Image (cartoon, rainbow, N blue to C red):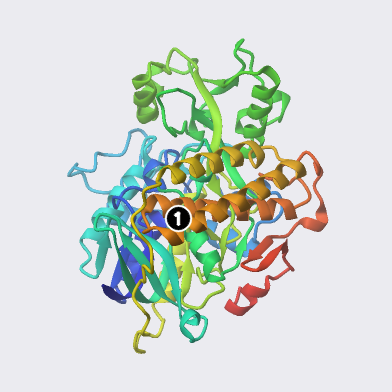
Protein backbone atom coordinates (compact mmCIF):
# COMPACT_ATOMS: atom_id res chain seq x y z
CA UNK A 1 0.00 0.00 0.00
CA UNK A 2 1.27 3.46 -0.90
CA UNK A 3 0.18 6.94 0.16
CA UNK A 4 1.37 10.31 -1.11
CA UNK A 5 1.29 13.79 0.41
CA UNK A 6 3.00 17.14 0.31
CA UNK A 7 4.11 16.99 3.95
CA UNK A 8 4.73 13.83 5.97
CA UNK A 9 4.98 14.64 9.69
CA UNK A 10 6.32 11.94 12.01
CA UNK A 11 5.10 12.73 15.53
CA UNK A 12 1.99 14.37 17.00
CA UNK A 13 3.36 16.47 19.86
CA UNK A 14 3.60 20.24 20.01
CA UNK A 15 6.14 20.51 17.17
CA UNK A 16 4.48 18.08 14.78
CA UNK A 17 0.92 19.37 15.18
CA UNK A 18 1.97 23.04 15.15
CA UNK A 19 3.77 22.41 11.86
CA UNK A 20 0.84 20.43 10.44
CA UNK A 21 -1.65 23.20 11.21
CA UNK A 22 0.34 25.77 9.23
CA UNK A 23 1.49 23.43 6.45
CA UNK A 24 -2.12 22.38 5.78
CA UNK A 25 -2.70 25.82 4.27
CA UNK A 26 -0.19 24.93 1.54
CA UNK A 27 -0.78 21.25 0.82
CA UNK A 28 -1.87 17.80 1.98
CA UNK A 29 -0.44 16.69 5.33
CA UNK A 30 -0.17 13.17 6.75
CA UNK A 31 0.72 12.94 10.44
CA UNK A 32 2.04 9.55 11.53
CA UNK A 33 1.95 8.76 15.26
CA UNK A 34 2.77 5.36 16.65
CA UNK A 35 0.17 5.27 19.41
CA UNK A 36 -2.75 7.60 20.17
CA UNK A 37 -2.67 11.11 18.69
CA UNK A 38 -2.20 12.72 22.11
CA UNK A 39 0.34 10.17 23.37
CA UNK A 40 3.36 12.48 23.34
CA UNK A 41 5.83 14.02 25.76
CA UNK A 42 3.97 17.29 25.27
CA UNK A 43 0.93 15.90 27.09
CA UNK A 44 2.96 15.24 30.23
CA UNK A 45 4.67 18.65 30.33
CA UNK A 46 3.78 20.29 33.63
CA UNK A 47 5.69 23.53 34.03
CA UNK A 48 4.84 25.56 30.96
CA UNK A 49 6.31 27.66 28.18
CA UNK A 50 9.00 30.29 28.73
CA UNK A 51 8.22 33.61 27.05
CA UNK A 52 8.88 37.28 27.78
CA UNK A 53 5.42 38.65 28.57
CA UNK A 54 5.78 40.38 31.94
CA UNK A 55 6.44 44.02 32.66
CA UNK A 56 10.03 44.35 33.83
CA UNK A 57 11.21 41.26 31.95
CA UNK A 58 13.18 41.54 28.71
CA UNK A 59 14.33 39.53 25.72
CA UNK A 60 17.92 40.25 26.72
CA UNK A 61 17.35 38.74 30.17
CA UNK A 62 15.79 35.56 28.72
CA UNK A 63 18.63 35.29 26.21
CA UNK A 64 21.22 35.69 28.96
CA UNK A 65 19.55 33.06 31.16
CA UNK A 66 19.53 30.62 28.22
CA UNK A 67 23.24 31.19 27.60
CA UNK A 68 24.13 30.75 31.27
CA UNK A 69 22.29 27.43 31.43
CA UNK A 70 23.80 26.32 28.11
CA UNK A 71 27.39 26.60 29.39
CA UNK A 72 28.78 28.58 26.50
CA UNK A 73 27.90 26.55 23.41
CA UNK A 74 24.42 27.78 22.55
CA UNK A 75 24.07 29.08 19.00
CA UNK A 76 23.50 32.80 19.43
CA UNK A 77 21.18 33.25 16.46
CA UNK A 78 18.98 30.31 17.48
CA UNK A 79 18.65 31.65 21.01
CA UNK A 80 17.77 35.15 19.87
CA UNK A 81 15.20 34.00 17.31
CA UNK A 82 13.53 31.61 19.72
CA UNK A 83 13.27 34.13 22.54
CA UNK A 84 12.07 37.01 20.38
CA UNK A 85 9.50 34.95 18.47
CA UNK A 86 8.17 33.23 21.60
CA UNK A 87 5.39 35.67 22.58
CA UNK A 88 3.76 35.40 19.13
CA UNK A 89 3.69 31.60 19.45
CA UNK A 90 1.90 31.90 22.81
CA UNK A 91 -0.68 34.10 21.13
CA UNK A 92 -1.07 31.53 18.36
CA UNK A 93 -1.93 28.90 20.98
CA UNK A 94 -4.46 31.26 22.50
CA UNK A 95 -5.93 31.82 19.07
CA UNK A 96 -6.58 28.10 18.52
CA UNK A 97 -8.15 27.74 21.97
CA UNK A 98 -5.41 26.95 24.50
CA UNK A 99 -6.24 28.48 27.88
CA UNK A 100 -3.55 29.63 30.29
CA UNK A 101 -3.74 30.87 33.86
CA UNK A 102 -4.11 34.61 34.15
CA UNK A 103 -3.38 36.84 37.12
CA UNK A 104 -5.83 36.30 39.94
CA UNK A 105 -7.34 33.04 38.72
CA UNK A 106 -6.70 29.82 36.84
CA UNK A 107 -7.44 29.26 33.19
CA UNK A 108 -11.09 28.58 32.45
CA UNK A 109 -12.02 25.00 31.71
CA UNK A 110 -11.67 24.08 28.05
CA UNK A 111 -15.43 23.52 27.88
CA UNK A 112 -16.15 26.98 29.27
CA UNK A 113 -17.97 29.52 27.11
CA UNK A 114 -15.88 32.35 28.57
CA UNK A 115 -14.21 34.39 25.82
CA UNK A 116 -10.47 34.13 25.35
CA UNK A 117 -8.56 37.15 26.66
CA UNK A 118 -7.16 39.44 23.99
CA UNK A 119 -3.65 38.41 22.98
CA UNK A 120 -2.39 41.93 23.43
CA UNK A 121 -3.58 42.61 26.97
CA UNK A 122 -3.51 39.25 28.73
CA UNK A 123 -2.01 39.52 32.21
CA UNK A 124 -0.67 36.00 32.61
CA UNK A 125 0.00 34.33 35.93
CA UNK A 126 3.68 33.57 35.35
CA UNK A 127 5.70 30.98 37.24
CA UNK A 128 9.38 31.24 38.16
CA UNK A 129 11.63 28.25 37.44
CA UNK A 130 15.26 27.35 38.05
CA UNK A 131 17.77 29.30 35.96
CA UNK A 132 15.30 32.09 35.12
CA UNK A 133 15.92 35.62 36.40
CA UNK A 134 12.24 36.59 36.12
CA UNK A 135 8.76 35.10 36.16
CA UNK A 136 8.12 34.15 32.55
CA UNK A 137 6.56 30.66 32.54
CA UNK A 138 3.11 30.67 30.93
CA UNK A 139 1.12 27.75 32.29
CA UNK A 140 -2.23 26.08 32.71
CA UNK A 141 -2.05 25.08 36.39
CA UNK A 142 0.55 22.28 36.42
CA UNK A 143 -0.89 20.51 33.38
CA UNK A 144 0.21 22.88 30.63
CA UNK A 145 1.19 20.21 28.13
CA UNK A 146 -2.16 18.49 28.41
CA UNK A 147 -3.97 21.76 27.64
CA UNK A 148 -1.68 22.63 24.74
CA UNK A 149 -1.98 19.15 23.23
CA UNK A 150 -5.78 19.25 23.57
CA UNK A 151 -5.96 22.54 21.72
CA UNK A 152 -3.62 21.36 18.95
CA UNK A 153 -5.40 18.03 18.43
CA UNK A 154 -8.78 19.74 18.24
CA UNK A 155 -7.48 22.36 15.81
CA UNK A 156 -5.87 19.68 13.62
CA UNK A 157 -9.11 17.67 13.53
CA UNK A 158 -10.85 20.69 11.99
CA UNK A 159 -8.35 20.98 9.13
CA UNK A 160 -9.51 19.09 6.05
CA UNK A 161 -5.97 18.84 4.65
CA UNK A 162 -4.64 16.90 7.66
CA UNK A 163 -4.85 13.10 7.84
CA UNK A 164 -3.76 11.68 11.19
CA UNK A 165 -2.68 8.04 11.18
CA UNK A 166 -2.71 6.71 14.73
CA UNK A 167 -1.04 3.39 15.50
CA UNK A 168 1.48 3.79 12.68
CA UNK A 169 5.21 3.72 13.43
CA UNK A 170 7.82 5.01 11.00
CA UNK A 171 10.45 2.36 10.31
CA UNK A 172 13.00 4.04 8.05
CA UNK A 173 13.30 7.05 5.80
CA UNK A 174 13.15 6.62 2.05
CA UNK A 175 16.02 8.35 0.31
CA UNK A 176 16.36 8.37 -3.46
CA UNK A 177 20.05 7.51 -3.10
CA UNK A 178 18.99 4.00 -2.10
CA UNK A 179 17.48 3.58 -5.55
CA UNK A 180 20.11 5.25 -7.71
CA UNK A 181 18.89 8.83 -7.45
CA UNK A 182 20.18 11.96 -5.69
CA UNK A 183 20.49 12.16 -1.90
CA UNK A 184 16.96 13.43 -1.24
CA UNK A 185 14.44 12.20 1.33
CA UNK A 186 11.22 11.10 -0.37
CA UNK A 187 9.16 9.81 2.57
CA UNK A 188 9.20 6.82 4.90
CA UNK A 189 8.12 3.26 5.40
CA UNK A 190 5.66 2.90 8.29
CA UNK A 191 4.27 -0.06 10.18
CA UNK A 192 0.50 -0.23 10.64
CA UNK A 193 0.78 -1.69 14.13
CA UNK A 194 -2.74 -3.15 14.33
CA UNK A 195 -2.68 -4.74 10.88
CA UNK A 196 0.96 -5.77 11.08
CA UNK A 197 1.53 -4.41 7.55
CA UNK A 198 4.13 -1.97 6.26
CA UNK A 199 2.97 0.91 4.09
CA UNK A 200 4.94 3.30 1.88
CA UNK A 201 4.36 7.05 2.35
CA UNK A 202 5.90 9.35 -0.25
CA UNK A 203 6.19 13.07 0.48
CA UNK A 204 7.65 16.26 -0.97
CA UNK A 205 8.86 17.14 2.53
CA UNK A 206 9.36 14.74 5.44
CA UNK A 207 9.33 16.33 8.89
CA UNK A 208 10.71 14.48 11.90
CA UNK A 209 8.92 15.64 15.06
CA UNK A 210 9.26 12.40 16.97
CA UNK A 211 10.29 13.81 20.35
CA UNK A 212 12.88 12.54 22.76
CA UNK A 213 14.61 9.31 23.74
CA UNK A 214 14.21 9.01 27.51
CA UNK A 215 13.44 5.29 27.29
CA UNK A 216 17.12 4.70 26.51
CA UNK A 217 17.59 5.09 30.30
CA UNK A 218 16.25 2.90 33.09
CA UNK A 219 14.56 5.80 34.88
CA UNK A 220 12.87 8.54 32.89
CA UNK A 221 10.09 11.11 33.11
CA UNK A 222 9.25 10.42 29.44
CA UNK A 223 6.27 8.42 28.16
CA UNK A 224 6.78 5.02 26.56
CA UNK A 225 6.78 6.53 23.06
CA UNK A 226 10.08 8.38 23.69
CA UNK A 227 12.46 5.93 22.01
CA UNK A 228 14.52 8.28 19.84
CA UNK A 229 12.91 7.14 16.59
CA UNK A 230 13.60 10.33 14.61
CA UNK A 231 17.26 10.60 15.59
CA UNK A 232 17.86 6.92 14.86
CA UNK A 233 16.15 7.02 11.45
CA UNK A 234 17.96 10.21 10.46
CA UNK A 235 21.32 8.74 11.47
CA UNK A 236 20.69 5.57 9.46
CA UNK A 237 19.77 7.73 6.46
CA UNK A 238 23.08 9.62 6.72
CA UNK A 239 22.03 12.88 8.40
CA UNK A 240 24.36 14.73 10.73
CA UNK A 241 23.67 14.36 14.48
CA UNK A 242 25.06 16.66 17.18
CA UNK A 243 25.64 16.86 20.94
CA UNK A 244 23.94 13.64 22.02
CA UNK A 245 26.15 13.59 25.14
CA UNK A 246 23.99 16.34 26.63
CA UNK A 247 21.09 14.35 28.06
CA UNK A 248 19.23 16.28 30.71
CA UNK A 249 18.18 14.52 33.90
CA UNK A 250 15.26 16.20 35.61
CA UNK A 251 16.19 16.56 39.28
CA UNK A 252 12.80 15.67 40.72
CA UNK A 253 10.89 12.59 39.60
CA UNK A 254 8.49 11.04 42.13
CA UNK A 255 10.08 8.08 43.91
CA UNK A 256 7.44 5.43 44.54
CA UNK A 257 7.29 1.70 43.77
CA UNK A 258 3.85 2.26 42.26
CA UNK A 259 4.57 5.43 40.28
CA UNK A 260 5.85 5.39 36.72
CA UNK A 261 7.77 8.36 35.26
CA UNK A 262 5.80 11.03 37.16
CA UNK A 263 7.58 14.37 37.05
CA UNK A 264 7.49 16.87 39.93
CA UNK A 265 7.55 20.23 38.18
CA UNK A 266 10.41 22.71 38.44
CA UNK A 267 7.73 25.26 39.34
CA UNK A 268 7.42 23.77 42.84
CA UNK A 269 10.96 24.90 43.58
CA UNK A 270 10.16 28.21 41.92
CA UNK A 271 7.39 28.66 44.49
CA UNK A 272 9.65 27.86 47.43
CA UNK A 273 9.93 24.06 47.72
CA UNK A 274 13.17 23.03 49.47
CA UNK A 275 15.31 19.95 48.87
CA UNK A 276 16.19 18.18 52.12
CA UNK A 277 18.10 15.17 53.39
CA UNK A 278 16.19 12.50 55.28
CA UNK A 279 17.05 14.26 58.53
CA UNK A 280 15.25 17.38 57.29
CA UNK A 281 18.41 19.39 56.58
CA UNK A 282 18.38 21.56 53.44
CA UNK A 283 21.46 20.95 51.28
CA UNK A 284 21.34 22.89 48.00
CA UNK A 285 23.14 25.98 49.39
CA UNK A 286 26.16 23.71 49.91
CA UNK A 287 26.34 23.16 46.15
CA UNK A 288 25.24 26.45 44.59
CA UNK A 289 24.37 29.91 45.89
CA UNK A 290 21.17 29.81 43.83
CA UNK A 291 20.10 26.78 45.88
CA UNK A 292 16.87 25.21 44.55
CA UNK A 293 16.78 27.72 41.67
CA UNK A 294 20.09 26.60 40.16
CA UNK A 295 19.93 25.10 36.63
CA UNK A 296 18.81 21.50 36.32
CA UNK A 297 22.24 20.00 35.73
CA UNK A 298 23.52 21.49 38.99
CA UNK A 299 20.52 20.33 41.00
CA UNK A 300 20.52 16.84 39.48
CA UNK A 301 24.23 16.32 40.26
CA UNK A 302 23.72 17.59 43.80
CA UNK A 303 20.90 15.11 44.42
CA UNK A 304 22.91 12.30 42.80
CA UNK A 305 25.87 13.11 45.07
CA UNK A 306 23.66 13.21 48.16
CA UNK A 307 22.16 9.82 47.34
CA UNK A 308 25.55 8.22 46.69
CA UNK A 309 27.11 9.81 49.77
CA UNK A 310 24.38 8.67 52.14
CA UNK A 311 23.22 5.49 50.41
CA UNK A 312 19.68 6.86 50.35
CA UNK A 313 17.33 5.87 47.55
CA UNK A 314 15.87 9.38 47.32
CA UNK A 315 15.89 12.89 48.79
CA UNK A 316 12.94 14.99 49.94
CA UNK A 317 11.25 17.95 48.25
CA UNK A 318 9.38 19.98 50.85
CA UNK A 319 6.68 22.57 50.19
CA UNK A 320 4.76 22.02 53.44
CA UNK A 321 5.61 25.54 54.65
CA UNK A 322 3.38 27.08 51.95
CA UNK A 323 -0.34 27.59 52.49
CA UNK A 324 -2.21 24.36 51.61
CA UNK A 325 -4.81 26.25 49.56
CA UNK A 326 -2.03 27.84 47.48
CA UNK A 327 -0.37 24.47 46.84
CA UNK A 328 -3.63 22.79 45.84
CA UNK A 329 -4.70 25.60 43.50
CA UNK A 330 -1.33 26.06 41.79
CA UNK A 331 -0.36 22.37 41.55
CA UNK A 332 -3.62 20.39 41.35
CA UNK A 333 -2.17 17.68 39.13
CA UNK A 334 0.86 17.04 41.33
CA UNK A 335 -1.27 17.20 44.48
CA UNK A 336 -3.77 14.67 43.10
CA UNK A 337 -1.16 12.27 41.74
CA UNK A 338 0.93 12.27 44.92
CA UNK A 339 -2.23 11.89 47.00
CA UNK A 340 -3.06 8.84 44.88
CA UNK A 341 0.20 7.30 46.10
CA UNK A 342 -0.48 8.21 49.73
CA UNK A 343 1.52 11.46 49.91
CA UNK A 344 -0.22 14.67 50.98
CA UNK A 345 2.23 17.28 49.71
CA UNK A 346 0.71 19.98 51.94
CA UNK A 347 1.81 18.05 55.06
CA UNK A 348 4.49 15.61 53.82
CA UNK A 349 7.71 16.10 51.84
CA UNK A 350 7.83 14.37 48.45
CA UNK A 351 10.42 11.60 47.87
CA UNK A 352 12.22 12.44 44.61
CA UNK A 353 15.06 11.16 42.42
CA UNK A 354 16.62 12.42 39.17
CA UNK A 355 15.45 10.79 35.92
CA UNK A 356 16.30 11.12 32.23
CA UNK A 357 14.19 13.93 30.88
CA UNK A 358 15.30 15.77 27.74
CA UNK A 359 17.71 15.28 24.84
CA UNK A 360 19.55 18.55 24.20
CA UNK A 361 21.27 17.15 21.11
CA UNK A 362 19.67 15.68 18.01
CA UNK A 363 19.48 15.97 14.24
CA UNK A 364 21.46 19.00 13.11
CA UNK A 365 19.25 21.63 11.47
CA UNK A 366 19.44 25.16 10.20
CA UNK A 367 17.22 27.90 11.61
CA UNK A 368 14.26 26.74 9.50
CA UNK A 369 14.44 23.07 10.43
CA UNK A 370 16.29 21.77 7.35
CA UNK A 371 18.65 18.86 8.00
CA UNK A 372 21.77 17.91 6.05
CA UNK A 373 19.59 15.73 3.75
CA UNK A 374 17.47 17.68 1.24
CA UNK A 375 13.77 17.05 1.71
CA UNK A 376 14.22 16.07 5.36
CA UNK A 377 13.33 18.46 8.19
CA UNK A 378 13.52 18.06 11.97
CA UNK A 379 11.78 20.08 14.68
CA UNK A 380 11.19 19.80 18.41
CA UNK A 381 13.17 17.62 20.78
CA UNK A 382 14.59 15.35 18.05
CA UNK A 383 16.31 18.35 16.43
CA UNK A 384 19.52 20.11 17.38
CA UNK A 385 18.92 23.79 16.67
CA UNK A 386 21.65 25.10 18.98
CA UNK A 387 19.13 26.70 21.34
CA UNK A 388 19.96 24.65 24.42
CA UNK A 389 23.73 24.37 24.27
CA UNK A 390 25.03 22.03 26.96
CA UNK A 391 21.93 22.24 29.16
CA UNK A 392 18.33 23.24 28.48
CA UNK A 393 16.88 26.11 30.46
CA UNK A 394 13.59 25.09 32.09
CA UNK A 395 10.48 25.50 29.89
CA UNK A 396 12.46 26.37 26.76
CA UNK A 397 11.48 23.02 25.21
CA UNK A 398 7.84 23.69 24.32
CA UNK A 399 8.97 27.13 23.20
CA UNK A 400 11.51 25.59 20.82
CA UNK A 401 8.91 23.22 19.37
CA UNK A 402 6.53 26.08 18.66
CA UNK A 403 9.04 28.53 17.19
CA UNK A 404 10.87 26.11 14.89
CA UNK A 405 7.66 24.40 13.75
CA UNK A 406 6.45 27.82 12.64
CA UNK A 407 9.72 28.64 10.88
CA UNK A 408 9.80 25.24 9.15
CA UNK A 409 6.20 25.64 7.97
CA UNK A 410 6.98 29.06 6.49
CA UNK A 411 10.08 27.71 4.71
CA UNK A 412 8.29 24.53 3.61
CA UNK A 413 5.53 26.50 1.92
CA UNK A 414 7.94 27.36 -0.92
CA UNK A 415 8.99 23.76 -1.63
CA UNK A 416 8.41 22.71 -5.26
CA UNK A 417 5.44 20.35 -5.38
CA UNK A 418 5.12 20.05 -9.15
CA UNK A 419 7.54 17.18 -9.83
CA UNK A 420 6.22 13.60 -9.86
CA UNK A 421 6.81 11.31 -6.90
CA UNK A 422 9.67 8.85 -7.39
CA UNK A 423 9.04 5.19 -8.00
CA UNK A 424 10.27 3.20 -5.02
CA UNK A 425 9.76 -0.48 -4.20
CA UNK A 426 7.21 -1.58 -1.65
CA UNK A 427 8.50 -2.98 1.66
CA UNK A 428 10.10 -6.38 1.12
CA UNK A 429 9.74 -8.89 3.97
CA UNK A 430 12.31 -11.15 2.36
CA UNK A 431 12.53 -14.46 4.22
CA UNK A 432 11.33 -13.03 7.55
CA UNK A 433 8.86 -15.08 9.58
CA UNK A 434 6.74 -14.44 12.70
CA UNK A 435 8.87 -14.42 15.85
CA UNK A 436 8.79 -17.17 18.44
CA UNK A 437 11.56 -15.55 20.54
CA UNK A 438 10.10 -12.25 21.73
CA UNK A 439 11.91 -12.74 25.06
CA UNK A 440 15.08 -11.60 23.27
CA UNK A 441 13.56 -8.13 22.81
CA UNK A 442 12.63 -7.89 26.49
CA UNK A 443 16.06 -9.06 27.65
CA UNK A 444 18.00 -6.71 25.38
CA UNK A 445 15.68 -3.79 26.17
CA UNK A 446 16.23 -4.20 29.92
CA UNK A 447 19.98 -4.72 29.61
CA UNK A 448 20.47 -1.73 27.33
CA UNK A 449 18.56 0.69 29.56
CA UNK A 450 20.28 -0.52 32.72
CA UNK A 451 23.81 -0.23 31.31
CA UNK A 452 23.02 3.28 30.04
CA UNK A 453 21.83 4.26 33.50
CA UNK A 454 24.88 2.80 35.26
CA UNK A 455 27.61 3.77 32.79
CA UNK A 456 26.33 6.81 30.87
CA UNK A 457 24.17 8.56 33.47
CA UNK A 458 24.55 11.78 35.45
CA UNK A 459 28.24 11.11 36.23
CA UNK A 460 30.49 9.33 33.70
CA UNK A 461 34.09 8.19 33.26
CA UNK A 462 36.23 6.99 30.38
CA UNK A 463 36.16 3.43 31.70
CA UNK A 464 32.36 3.42 32.01
CA UNK A 465 31.97 4.77 28.49
CA UNK A 466 34.31 2.11 27.04
CA UNK A 467 32.35 -0.63 28.81
CA UNK A 468 29.08 0.79 27.53
CA UNK A 469 30.39 1.02 23.95
CA UNK A 470 31.50 -2.63 23.93
CA UNK A 471 28.22 -3.94 25.28
CA UNK A 472 26.08 -1.74 23.02
CA UNK A 473 27.98 -3.06 19.99
CA UNK A 474 27.22 -6.65 21.02
CA UNK A 475 23.56 -5.85 21.61
CA UNK A 476 23.28 -4.15 18.24
CA UNK A 477 24.59 -7.30 16.58
CA UNK A 478 21.91 -9.39 18.30
CA UNK A 479 19.21 -6.86 17.42
CA UNK A 480 20.26 -6.74 13.75
CA UNK A 481 20.15 -10.53 13.51
CA UNK A 482 16.64 -10.56 15.00
CA UNK A 483 15.52 -7.65 12.77
CA UNK A 484 16.35 -9.46 9.53
CA UNK A 485 15.04 -12.83 10.66
CA UNK A 486 11.56 -11.87 11.90
CA UNK A 487 8.64 -9.63 10.93
CA UNK A 488 8.99 -6.13 12.34
CA UNK A 489 6.95 -5.15 15.39
CA UNK A 490 6.74 -1.87 17.31
CA UNK A 491 8.71 -3.35 20.22
CA UNK A 492 11.50 -4.51 17.90
CA UNK A 493 11.66 -1.18 16.09
CA UNK A 494 11.80 0.75 19.35
CA UNK A 495 14.59 -1.51 20.66
CA UNK A 496 16.54 -1.01 17.44
CA UNK A 497 16.15 2.76 17.78
CA UNK A 498 17.16 3.08 21.42
CA UNK A 499 20.25 0.96 20.69
CA UNK A 500 21.20 3.44 17.96
CA UNK A 501 20.58 6.40 20.28
CA UNK A 502 22.66 4.73 23.00
CA UNK A 503 25.51 4.32 20.53
CA UNK A 504 25.31 8.01 19.58
CA UNK A 505 25.24 9.21 23.20
CA UNK A 506 28.32 7.14 24.03
CA UNK A 507 30.18 8.24 20.89
CA UNK A 508 29.55 11.92 21.56
CA UNK A 509 30.32 11.60 25.28
CA UNK A 510 33.61 9.85 24.53
CA UNK A 511 34.62 12.64 22.16
CA UNK A 512 33.92 15.44 24.67
CA UNK A 513 36.92 15.25 26.97
CA UNK A 514 35.79 17.88 29.45
CA UNK A 515 32.90 18.47 31.86
CA UNK A 516 30.39 20.94 30.46
CA UNK A 517 26.73 21.38 31.30
CA UNK A 518 24.99 18.02 31.39
CA UNK A 519 28.12 16.07 30.49
CA UNK A 520 30.09 15.46 33.69
CA UNK A 521 33.01 13.03 33.62
CA UNK A 522 35.30 12.07 36.49
CA UNK A 523 38.32 11.87 34.14
CA UNK A 524 37.96 15.38 32.69
CA UNK A 525 36.32 17.47 35.40
CA UNK A 526 37.39 20.89 34.15
CA UNK A 527 35.86 23.03 31.43
CA UNK A 528 38.07 23.15 28.34
CA UNK A 529 37.68 26.39 26.33
CA UNK A 530 39.01 24.62 23.23
CA UNK A 531 35.96 22.34 23.30
CA UNK A 532 33.37 25.13 23.33
CA UNK A 533 31.81 23.74 20.15
CA UNK A 534 29.41 21.03 19.06
CA UNK A 535 30.30 17.36 18.79
CA UNK A 536 28.95 15.98 15.50
CA UNK A 537 28.63 12.46 14.13
CA UNK A 538 27.44 10.89 10.89
CA UNK A 539 27.06 7.29 9.80
CA UNK A 540 30.53 6.03 8.94
CA UNK A 541 32.20 9.15 10.39
CA UNK A 542 33.40 9.04 14.04
CA UNK A 543 32.19 11.70 16.44
CA UNK A 544 34.40 14.77 16.34
CA UNK A 545 34.55 18.38 17.46
CA UNK A 546 32.77 20.49 14.85
CA UNK A 547 34.42 23.40 13.13
CA UNK A 548 33.04 26.84 13.93
CA UNK A 549 30.46 26.23 11.20
CA UNK A 550 29.52 22.59 10.61
CA UNK A 551 30.24 21.29 7.12
CA UNK A 552 26.78 19.81 6.77
CA UNK A 553 25.09 23.04 7.77
CA UNK A 554 27.10 25.11 5.31
CA UNK A 555 25.21 23.19 2.65
CA UNK A 556 21.82 24.17 4.00
CA UNK A 557 22.66 27.72 4.91
CA UNK A 558 23.02 28.06 8.67
In the image, is residue 2 above or below residue 45?
below
| Residue 303 point in image, percent of width and height | 63, 27
| Residue 315 point in image, percent of width and height | 58, 21
Dot 1: within a 10 Å radius of its alpha carbon, few (fewer than 14), some, or many (20 or more) residues? some
Q: Nearer the viewer, residue 74 or 171?
A: 171
In the image, is residue 106 above or below residue 371?
above
Residue under the point 74% across and 68% down = 547
Left or right of 382: which side holds 145? left
- At numbered mark 1, what does the secondary structure look like: helix, strand or loop? helix
Residue under the point 58% across and 21% down = 313
| Residue 517 point in image, percent of width and height | 69, 45
Q: Which residue is situated farthest in the top direction here?
A: 279
Q: Which residue is situated farthest in the bottom direction here?
A: 419
Residue 439, quarter of picture: top left
Residue under the point 41% across and 17% down = 343
Residue 488, quarter of picture: bottom left
| Residue 130 point in image, percent of width and height | 58, 37
Q: Nearer the viewer, residue 272 or 411?
A: 411
Question: Is residue 136 visible in the rendered structure shown here?
Answer: no
Q: Nearer the viewer, residue 497 or 259?
A: 497
Left or right of 353: which side holds 165? left
Quarter holding the C terminus is: bottom right
Left or right of 507: which side holds 437? left
The residue carrying mark 1 is 87
Quarter holding the N terminus is: bottom left
Residue under the point 47% across and 33% down = 265
Question: Is residue 29 visible in the rendered structure shown here?
Answer: yes
Left or right of 59: which side holds 256? left
Q: How many marks?
A: 1
In the image, is residue 314 above or below residue 1?
above
Amino acid sequence: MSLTCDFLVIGSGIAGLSFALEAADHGQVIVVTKRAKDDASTTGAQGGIAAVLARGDSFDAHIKDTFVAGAGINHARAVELCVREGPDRIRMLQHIGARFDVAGHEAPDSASSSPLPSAGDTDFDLHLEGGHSARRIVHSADMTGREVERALVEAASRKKNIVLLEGHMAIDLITRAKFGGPEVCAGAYALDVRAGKVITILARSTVLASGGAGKVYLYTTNPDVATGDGVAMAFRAGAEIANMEFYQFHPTCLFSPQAKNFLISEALRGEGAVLRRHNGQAFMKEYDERAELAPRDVVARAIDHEMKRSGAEYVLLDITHRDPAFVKSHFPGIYAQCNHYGIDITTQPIPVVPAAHFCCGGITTDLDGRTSIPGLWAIGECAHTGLHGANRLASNSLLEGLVFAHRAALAGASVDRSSPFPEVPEWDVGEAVPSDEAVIITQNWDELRRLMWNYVGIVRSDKRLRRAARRISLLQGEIAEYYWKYFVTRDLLELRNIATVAQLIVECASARRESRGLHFTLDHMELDPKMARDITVKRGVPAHLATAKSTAMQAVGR
